[in-house]
Image: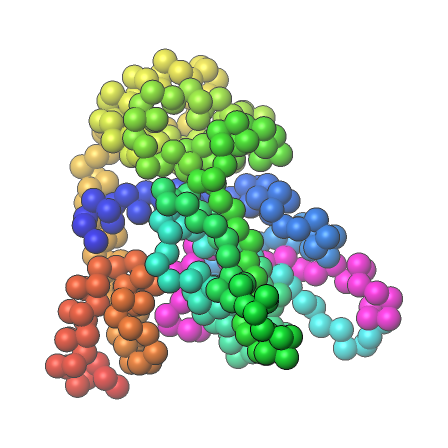
């Protein structure tokens, strides 16, 4: 993976994780994409991010984009179940995974590894296993149709065999396949329509240079001040990076497009030019930290002897040469094998 690709992938990751760090925005997504027949069982007022992710599996916790939880509404259960004296406090876990390119291996494998890492943590901490809903958010250039690995088997095999085949379920949000008009009509997403349009055209820097107003028109100040300021800052920084424009040139365009009240009391992209030197130093430190984290994860995965080098590279989104380098290090250093 080239440094340019790493940087551009990091742009997506930072933006998505920023969105998922704001509960008000997470709720907009959940209300739109969680199946309607399931929503009455979810107590959305209890939504919180699992910041520690309390997943003990060394390979997984840091690689999902975010995990949120909500309590189950017991009052929606049948009366016969509600009256049970040992009824647990069940919880829903929403496991977010963002993809800016179509994965080479079936997504079900990654989803299930994450799912059982959470379940293992639940059991270790003497909790009932969570009800886990994986949510895949995709905005890559390649068309990706949601299809289960064993989907076609239903027409070729009897039920006696089918019941032994895995059928992992997940919610698939395909921004890449949405038209700009469809996104604009999703009024329930409110300011997130700006994020969806930015993500849809994330691979087309010319779009950002020519159509900035199309992105900014859904950024409404009617949202709470904290949400507005946080989201607007993230959006501008993401768009500036994706446009490949110099900060000064980008600032001039933004100033022409924005309403005066949209820049009041906001630390925006206008300050980026002054922070460039500082940001370069911070990013270098972050990159070195990420490499060390990835190195440790690779060592742990190699010790399991379950994954091929290419699978490890795909799961951790690192260059396969880096995996081979760590593999050689592991083989030559007895202290690492313990």
In this picture, residue 147 sits left or right of residue 11: right
Residue that appears at 41% across and 33% down: 198
Query: 155 or 224: nearer the eye?
Result: 155
Q: How is the image coloured?
A: rainbow
User: Residue 90 is drawn in which quadrant?
Assistant: bottom right
Which image quadrant: the C terminus?
bottom left
User: Residue 62 is drawn in which quadrant?
Assistant: bottom left
Image position of 239 with respect to 284: above or below? above
Q: Is residue 75 magenta?
A: yes
- Tell me which segment is drawn in magenta: 54-82
Image position of 173 with respect to 312: above or below? above
The x and y percentages for residue 65 are: 43, 54
Q: Is residue 180 magenta?
A: no
The x and y percentages for residue 114 are: 46, 66
The x and y percentages for residue 25 are: 55, 41
Residue that appears at 19% across and 48% down: 3
Residue that appears at 42% across and 73% down: 57
Can I make out residue 282 in this image? no
Query: 73 or 141: nearer the eye?
Result: 141
Q: Name the outermost residue toward the left.
A: 332
Query: 106 or 273: nearer the eye?
Result: 106
The x and y percentages for residue 103 are: 37, 56
Query: 82 or 267: nearer the eye?
Result: 82
Image position of 289 with respect to 153: above or below? above
Can I make out residue 51 in this image? yes
User: Residue 109 is drawn in which quadrant?
Assistant: bottom left
**Number of marks in the image?**
0
């Amino acid at each position: 993976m080239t440094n340019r690709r790493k940087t551009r992938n990091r742009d997506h990751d930072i933006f998505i994780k920023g969105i998922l760090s704001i509960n008000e925005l997470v709720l907009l997504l959940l209300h739109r994409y969680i199946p309607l027949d399931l929503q009455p069982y979810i107590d959305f007022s209890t939504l919180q991010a699992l910041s520690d992710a309390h997943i003990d599996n060394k390979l997984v916790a840091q690689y999902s984009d975010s995990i949120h939880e909500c309590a189950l509404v017991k009052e929606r259960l049948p009366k016969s179940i509600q009256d049970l004296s040992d009824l647990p406090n069940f919880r829903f876990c929403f496991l977010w995974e963002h993809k800016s390119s179509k994965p080479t291996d079936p997504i079900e494998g990654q989803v299930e590894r994450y799912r059982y890492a959470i379940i293992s943590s639940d059991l270790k901490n003497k909790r009932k296993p969570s009800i886990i809903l994986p949510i895949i958010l995709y905005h890559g250039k390649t068309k990706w149709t949601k299809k289960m690995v064993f989907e076609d088997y239903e027409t070729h095999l009897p039920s006696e065999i089918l019941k032994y085949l895995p059928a992992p379920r997940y919610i698939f949000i395909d921004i890449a396949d949405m038209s700009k008009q469809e996104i604009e009509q999703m009024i329930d997403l409110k300011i997130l329509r700006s994020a969806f349009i930015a993500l849809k055209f994330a691979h087309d820097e010319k779009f950002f240079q020519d159509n900035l107003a199309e992105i900014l028109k859904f950024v409404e100040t009617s949202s709470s001040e904290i949400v507005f300021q946080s989201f607007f800052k993230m959006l501008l920084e993401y768009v500036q990076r994706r446009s490949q424009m110099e900060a000064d040139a980008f600032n001039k365009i933004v100033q022409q497009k924005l309403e005066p009240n949209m820049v009041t009391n906001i630390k925006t992209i206008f300050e980026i030019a002054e922070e460039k030197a500082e940001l370069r130093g911070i990013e270098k430190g972050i990159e070195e930290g990420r490499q060390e984290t990835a190195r440790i994860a690779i060592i742990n995965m190699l010790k399991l002897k379950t994954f091929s080098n290419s699978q490890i590279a795909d799961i951790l989104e690192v260059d396969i040469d880096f995996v081979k380098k760590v593999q050689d290090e592991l083989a030559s250093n007895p202290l690492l094998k313990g």
